[in-house]
Amino acid sequence: MKDYKLKLSAINLPLMIRTLILLITLGFIAKSDAITVTTIDSGAKFSAAFSPHGDSLSLILQGINLAHKTIDIAAYSFTSKPIAIALYAAFGRGVKVRVVADARSNLGHSSVLLYLANHGAVVRLNNHYKIFHDKFMIIDGTTLETGSFNYSAAAANNNVENVLLLWNEASPLISN
């Protein structure tokens, strides 16, 4: 058995994002024996934040507020009113907002998905798995927000969570 060492700076973000979107869209896991590794553009940057009572929510809102064209979201729990309001404002600026979320965790009254759907976002609920546990956003096809942070007040104020924003303006992660 071979040992492979991967550095964060060597992960192929475009391939990673395309794979995540394919898995979400088609609803199955692709198996591969090979991993393609290339260097991220030298202009790529990252921001990290932590909660509770840290800057996690602020970092997510910053990413949303800087969007110009698209925001694609995969979410497990989506009850955050500040994030829903920021997405509504982005939609008002002409940003296309699309959400795929876990069906069972978003059926209650606290979910903001109905609000988003009623205000122009494309919303799909996924019930193909026991839980749809993804938590990420792709902003303008170039910036990735990911981490353990559920889009909820509990993630911002009660739980130990992390948010990582990978700014990769030099080249698209996905083609729109």
Image (cartoon, rainbow, N blue to C red):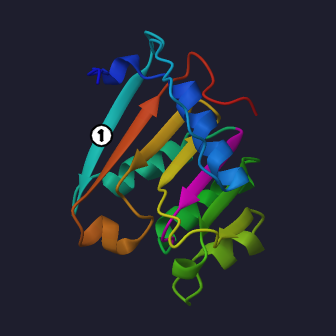
* SS under mark 1: strand
Question: Which image quarter holds the C terminus?
Answer: top right
Q: How many marks do you count on the picture?
A: 1
x, y percent for residue 33: 50, 28
Q: Is residue 38 left or right of residue 155?
A: right
Q: Residue at x 57, y 66 (%)?
A: 84
Q: Is residue 133 left or right of residue 74?
A: left
Give 83 or 6, whichever is nearer the viewer.
6
Q: Residue at x 52, y 73 (%)?
A: 130
Asked whether the viewer can see residue 28, the reply is: yes
x, y percent for residue 94: 77, 47
Q: Tell me which amino acid carries mark 1.
A: Ala
The secondary structure making up most of the magenta span is strand
In the displayed image of the protein, which residue is found farthest to the front?
1
Q: Kindly identify which residue carries mark 1.
A: 48
Residue 111: quarter of image: bottom right
Give 90 or 50, whichever is nearer the viewer.
50
Residue 22: quarter of image: top right
Q: Which residues are magenta?
A: 69-78
Q: Is residue 34 above or below residue 149?
A: above
Q: Is residue 85 left or right of residue 148?
A: right
x, y percent for residue 69: 71, 39
The verdict on residue 16 being magenta is no
Q: Few, some or many C-alpha atoms within 10 Å of disc 1 (few <14, some 14-19, many ≥20)?
A: some
The verdict on residue 74 being magenta is yes
